[in-house]
Image: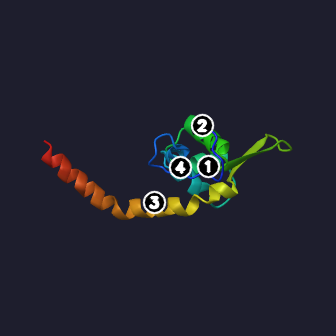
Amino acid sequence: MSVGHDEKFDITVQGCPSRSVLRHATDRWTPLIVPALAGGALRFSALKEAVAGVSSKVLTETLRSLQRDGLVHREVFVDHTPIRVEYELTELGRTLILPLAALRTWAETYAPDVLKARDVYDAGSE
């Protein structure tokens, strides 16, 4: 479904493309990859190290998806032996840095409250 730039998007409307954009921006790995790339381009191995716990397969799939959406640029340097590949945020991708930083701050600030609420809920449902 192609939508013109002048059309309105409403995430509450079923079928609105903004839903898939939100889902992608808040998937499991994007909020970890974007901050890792915020400081500049990284090679795959450095990015994998920065995003602890991600498998090579999942990192590759997520980077391809981010590249498809115009959020990440992949550059291949063929004049190096071995060939070097770097990933960096595009201008559009950089627009995610602040919103994801705010989400991270919220998660780290309120994690104790959420964990306490879980304990209370779990204790009451036994």
Of 77 and 125, nearer the camera is: 125
Mark 3 is surrounded, within 10 Å at the Cα level, by few (under 14), some (14 to 19) or many (20 or more) other residues, namely: few
At mark 3, the secondary structure is helix
Mark earlier in primary sequence (4, 1): 4
Kindly report the distance in space between the C-alpha atoms of the residues bearing marks 3 and 4. 11 Å
Q: Mark 3 points at which residue?
A: 103
Give, as a three-letter code, the residue at label 1. Answer: Leu
At mark 2, the secondary structure is helix
Q: Mark 1 points at which residue?
A: 47
Between circles 1 and 3, the one closer to the viewer is: 3
Give, as a three-letter code, the residue at label 2. Answer: Glu
Residue appearing at x 63%, y 59% in the figure: 94
Kindly report the distance in space between the C-alpha atoms of the residues bearing marks 1 and 2. 13 Å
Q: Point out the image quarter for the C terminus.
A: top left
Q: Name the residue under label 2.
A: 61
Residue 6: x and y in percent read 64, 53
Mark 1 is surrounded, within 10 Å at the Cα level, by few (under 14), some (14 to 19) or many (20 or more) other residues, namely: some
Give, as a three-letter code, the residue at label 3. Answer: Leu
Mark earlier in primary sequence (1, 2): 1
The answer to whether residue 71 is visible is: yes
**Residue at the right extreme of this rendering:** 79
The answer to whether residue 51 is visible is: no
Residue 106: x and y in percent read 40, 63
At mark 4, the secondary structure is helix
Kindly report the distance in space between the C-alpha atoms of the residues bearing marks 4 and 2. 14 Å
Question: Taking 74 as reference, is 109 left or right?
Answer: left
Residue appearing at x 60%, y 37% in the figure: 61
